Image (tube, rainbow, N blue to C red):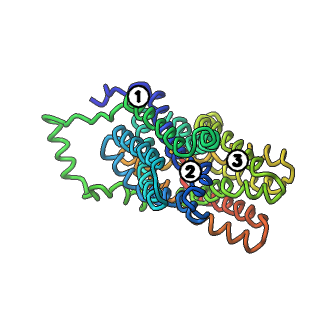
Amino acid sequence: MEASQKRGNPWLSLTAVTLAFSFTFLSRYIWSPLMADVSSEFGINATQAGLYMSAFFAGYLVTQIPGGIMADKYQPKYILMICTALGGIMTAMMSMIQSYEMGLAIRVITGVSSGCVMAQCSKVVATTFEPKKRASAMGVVLASPPFGITLAQSLGAPLNQAIGWRNTFLAVAVVAVVIVAMIAMWVPATAKKAAPTGEAAKAAAQTAAAAPAKQAGLLEGLIGFFTNKQQLLLGASGFMFMFISVGFATWTNRYAQSLGFTPVQGGMIITCYSIAGIAASCISGSLADKLHLSHRNFLILSLSLMGAMTLVFSFQSSYAGLLVVGIIYGAASYLPSTHYTTSAMILAGERFTATAASSQNLLFQLASFIMPVVVGRAIDATGNYSLVWYIFCGCAVISVIFCFFVKNDK
């Protein structure tokens, strides 16, 4: 049965899951360009407006591991359709909010629907692509964050100006309908292996009886991840990596303004950074193949480049310099993700690829909670951004050190 499993067109499947993952970032960050108008209508202060992002993120983190477990045990295609549809419905409901509290509850549910998506995408890649091609496919999937953010930033303001913030939420919700249809048509259902019969069944039963007892049930893959030294080393390295990448995207606009540039100019630096990241993520897997580098060695190389570009960026004072270095920085910053996720999937084995990917992502995303406090305190204590860049560079060094202790996979 497994030999004849119909996989469909893997590239159409990859397109569908990449768009589904991109939609989670579009629905998350569309709030940013609409924030001012919604705040004005409901009398929301800056802290309350920021909680709309935190509410989404809380729901997103809570469902990371459950999403991975479900992807490994059930049909990722149908879970992905349900999650994308729910995200679209919740985004549409944002157009109908009548109070701050109502919007906050909707954002939490939107985050819950989004938190399961990455695990389903990674499982679809694992079941539709051969092992040698998975790194390249995951590179495309992991271009979703900068792609979704770029869409939100570039479309949000013009749509808000043309049709208002309520209709902008509705327009974004329509995108989810299209993506659900793509998933239904292009993503194959995972075929289940036929049960053995006759002598094969007897042999399987004898093997099972002779095998040592293993942790069974929903937590097997999760326990396997958190008791694997290699997974934890990758997770610690990725935590530091995420601290830098999220920190750069969060604080660069304000840093540019502190140098005398406008918010529009600061936003352009981030946009170019994101576009370079999309391109780099898509080619990350094939680039490592062409260089004949293992996942670990490619991580060491790209993280070292990331640390070096952190220092180079901190020395720039002209807008042209910030823009050019920002593009190179963006490319370097999105090279590692593919190899972190692919390594986690390899270490977990075929049964628990999604659980490993989602557990690793949970460790990475914890940096997003810690980073604002650490960087904010550094800025308040010094009154400038000099210490921030040294913190980011130090994180890159620590990240590389953790990678050196990871087994050098071939």
Residue ID at (59%, 36%): 282
Q: Assess disc 1: are there few (<14), some (14-19) or many (≥20) residues with their C-alpha within 10 Å of its C-alpha.
A: many
Image coords of residue 255 (percent x, y): 76, 58
In the image, is 104 to the left or to the right of 272? left
Foreground: 63 or 91? Answer: 91
In the image, is 217 to the left or to the right of 68? left
Q: CA distance from mark 2 to mark 1?
A: 30 Å
Given the image, on which type of amino acid does mark 1 rest? Trp
Given the image, on which type of amino acid does mark 3 rest? Ile
- Mark 3 and mark 1 lie on one chain; the one further toward the N terminus is 1
From the image, state whether disc 2 or disc 1 is nearer to you. 2
Q: CA distance from mark 3 to mark 2?
A: 17 Å
Foreground: 289 or 212? Answer: 289
Residue farthest to the left, as pictured? 198
Given the image, on which type of amino acid does mark 2 rest? Trp
Residue ID at (26%, 35%): 193
In which quadrant is the N terminus drawn?
Answer: top left
Residue behind mark 2: 31
In the image, is 223 to the left or to the right of 17? left
Q: CA distance from mark 3 to mark 1?
A: 33 Å
Residue behind mark 1: 186
Image coords of residue 271 (percent x, y): 69, 43
Is residue 52 visible to the viewer in this orientation of the structure?
Answer: yes
- Mark 3 and mark 2 lie on one chain; the one further toward the N terminus is 2
Q: Secondary structure at mark 1?
A: helix
Image coords of residue 306 (percent x, y): 70, 51
